[in-house]
């Protein structure tokens, strides 16, 4: 009986959209590996922002924040392997990924709140009819 309860709890936490999480994680991994392998004059790190942007399209603010944090960490690793984190170019890239990730999390949180309010208004409208 405990196994069944645990399985039920797991399936209630798992959503089909979580399968889409593979795409942003693949973007982070691919971008980081290619950027590490390219010369220092070529910067692909800004492409990391695509991962939290895509995540915000299908997941909530928590998962978007986690992917954004992972993108920032990947940018820091890239910077450390390409001349140091303290170079102005790398500092700007890290700051850009961080700021845009925070913006996406706030946007997603506001969107979720709007969707909840819209759901309440719809339920009131159904009852009123």
Image (cartoon, helix red, strand yellow):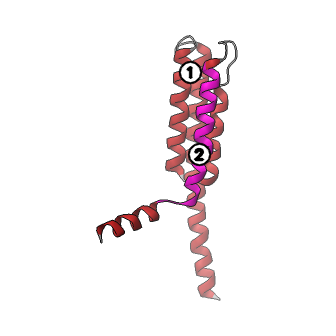
42 over 20 or under it: above or below: above
Q: Which residue is mark 2?
A: 22
Toward the right, the furthest residue is 42
The residue at 59%/45% (across/down) is 22
Q: Nearer the viewer, residue 51 or 112?
A: 51
Measured along the vertical axis of the image, is residue 89 above or below residue 14?
Answer: above
Q: Nearer the viewer, residue 19 or 126?
A: 19
For image coordinates 63% across by 36% down, the residue present is 27
Q: Label 2: few (<14), some or many (≥20) within 10 Å?
A: few
| Residue located beneath label 1 in the image | 78
Residue 30 counted in the magenta span: yes
Q: Position of residue 46 (x, y in %)?
A: 66, 28
Q: Which residues are magenta?
A: 14-36
In the image, residue 74 lies at what x, y percent?
Answer: 54, 28
**What secondary structure is found at the residue carrying circle 1?**
helix
Q: Is residue 78 magenta?
A: no
Label 2 or label 1, whichever comes before in sequence order: 2
- Residue drawn at 41 percent across, 68 percent down: 8
| Disc 1 crowd, CA 10 A, few/some/many (<14, 14-19, 20+) | many
């Amino acid at each position: 009986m405990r196994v069944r309860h645990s399985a039920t709890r797991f399936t209630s936490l798992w959503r089909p959209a979580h399968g889409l999480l593979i795409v942003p994680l693949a973007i982070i991994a691919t971008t980081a590996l290619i950027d590490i392998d390219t010369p220092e004059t070529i910067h692909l790190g800004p492409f990391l922002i695509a991962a939290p942007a895509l995540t915000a399209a299908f997941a909530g603010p928590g998962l978007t924040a986690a992917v954004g944090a992972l993108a920032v960490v990947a940018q820091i690793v890239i910077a450390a392997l390409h001349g140091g984190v303290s170079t102005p170019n790398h500092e700007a890239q890290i700051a850009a990924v961080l700021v845009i990730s925070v913006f996406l999390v706030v946007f997603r949180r506001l969107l979720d709140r709007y969707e909840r309010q819209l759901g309440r208004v719809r339920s009131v409208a159904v009852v009123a009819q």
